[in-house]
Amino acid sequence: QQPVQSPQAVILREGEDAVINCSSSKALYSVHWYRQKHGEAPVFLMILLKGGEQKGHDKISASFNEKKQQSSLYLTASQLSYSGTYFCGTMQTGANNLFFGTGTRLTVIP
Amino acid sequence: NAGVTQTPKFQVLKTGQSMTLQCAQDMNHNSMYWYRQDPGMGLRLIYYSASEGTTDKGEVPNGYNVSRLNKREFSLRLESAAPSQTSVYFCASKEDRSTEAFFGQGTRLTVV
């Protein structure tokens, strides 16, 4: 029931853009995005609720296609601070469990 | 403002020993979760509690038990630890289905 994330890893130069994808085989109520730095707890980025809403703050945004049960996280003009592992979490319709994908390791180099 | 507090932060157990990981939140959240994190496996859900008095299995519940002692506390027990349970364990809580989850700082458990 884990959502599927892709790619598994990506290396960017500062200023480049990246897209991380998340998909589920179940009907979703919400999609969560988190970033985790090495040795730390995951930190919340944004949540997208059923309704196809796109959200964003600063240069990080996300979309949720509820018909396809897919979400994408967009990072534009990447900064060194964007480095870390990104996780999508999904909550199914009618359930209270929160499942996470296997993560995407993002490395931004100067 | 503590948020989600996990104890202990580090633990080494011998195979067959038992222990309880503690988790407490001070945000009056309804739902609480236990995850384990292993390299390349992401965060895998062990057990969760949608509300006080209820618990449900996640993806990897075997070898674990949980107790939702009250609204604040959700403990995870290993009855007979095995080396395969060596992992980093995270507790999380959320207010309801429309809000984000807050994570504790994790417990690094090694079973030898």
Image (cartoon, grey):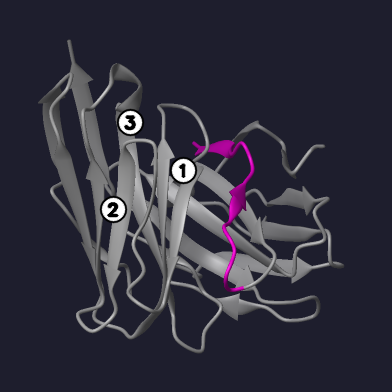
Q: Is residue A8 left or right of residue B88?
A: left
Range of residues picked out in magenta: B97-112
In the rendered image of this protein, does residue B100 appear above or below residue B9?
below
Tell whether position B99 is magenta.
yes
Name the chain under label 3: A
Q: Which mark is residue B87?
A: 1
Work out whether residue B66 can be spotted: yes
Q: Secondary structure at mark 3?
A: strand
* Quadrant of the snapshot with the C terminus of chain A: top left
Q: Is residue A28 magenta?
A: no
Q: Are marks 2 and 3 on the same chain?
A: yes
The residue mark sitting in front, 2 or 1, is 2
Q: Which mark is residue B19?
A: none
> Residue B1's spot in the image, x, y percent?
82, 37
B23 with respect to B109 (left or right): right
Q: Can I make out residue B78 in this image?
A: no
Instruction: Identify the residue at the far top of this view.
Output: A110
Separation (CA) of disc 2 from disc 3: 13 Å
The alpha-carbon separation of the residues under discs 1 and 3 comes to 19 Å
Name the kind of residue labelled 2 in the image: Thr
Q: Which residue is mark 2?
A: A102
The answer to which of B35 and B32 lies nearer the viewer is: B32
Q: Chain of mark 2?
A: A
Q: Secondary structure at mark 1?
A: strand
> On the image, numbered disc 3 is attached to which residue?
A84
Which residue is nearer to you in this view: B45 or A35? A35
Residue B45 image point, x, y percent: 47, 64
- The reply to whether label 2 and label 1 mark residues of one chain is no
Mark 2 or 3 closer to N-term?
A: 3
Q: Are marks 1 and 3 on the same chain?
A: no
